[in-house]
Image (cartoon, rainbow, N blue to C red):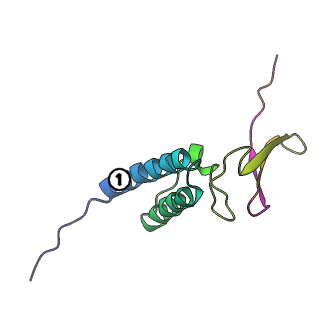
Amino acid sequence: MKRRRRINTRSIKKIARERIEHLLELAKAVFSTDSNLAQRYVQLALRIGMRHKVRIPRSQRWQICKHCHSLLIPGVTCHSRLRNKREPHIVITCYKCKNYSRYPYKVKKQR
């Protein structure tokens, strides 16, 4: 009976995080020349994250539309607005699917 090698899940998740970050950086760099290739990089990053159960870093999560999974570049593929009603939040509207996402932020109180 053959013994299987035990795979270290920590190292796999670390590699997956690095690949996700690298793919999203490539997507931003390539977007101006080939938007379809940038979209493919985003799809691959999301697929790697789902397959290995790795979260996309918060700093890069807002750059992907939650509805259509397109790359969000302010002024090109989306626009963002600051709102203060209820809680202060940023509203990012995707031009491709016309949906919006809200991200809360804290206001620093001045003394």
In the visual, does 65 lie left or right of 58?
A: right
Q: Quadrant of the C terminus?
A: top right
**Placement of 109 over or under 5, stated as above or below:** above
Q: Are there few (<14), some (14-19), or many (20+) residues within 10 Å of tag 1?
A: few
Q: Which residue appears farthest toward the front when viewing the image?
A: 33
**Quadrant assignment, res 8:** bottom left
Q: Residue furthest bottom?
A: 1
Magenta segment boundaries in residue numbering: 96-106
Q: Nearer the viewer, residue 4 or 98?
A: 98
Q: Position of residue 109 (x, y in %)?
A: 80, 24
Q: Verify whether residue 101 appears in magenta.
A: yes
**Vertical arrangement, residue 36 with respect to residue 80, above or below:** below
- Residue type (three-letter) at the residue carrying disc 1: Ile
Residue 105 percent across, percent down from the top left: 74, 39
Name the residue located 35 percent from the left edge and 53 percent from the top edge.
Answer: 15
Looking at the rendered structure, the secondary structure element under dot 1 is helix
Q: Which residue is mark 1?
A: 15
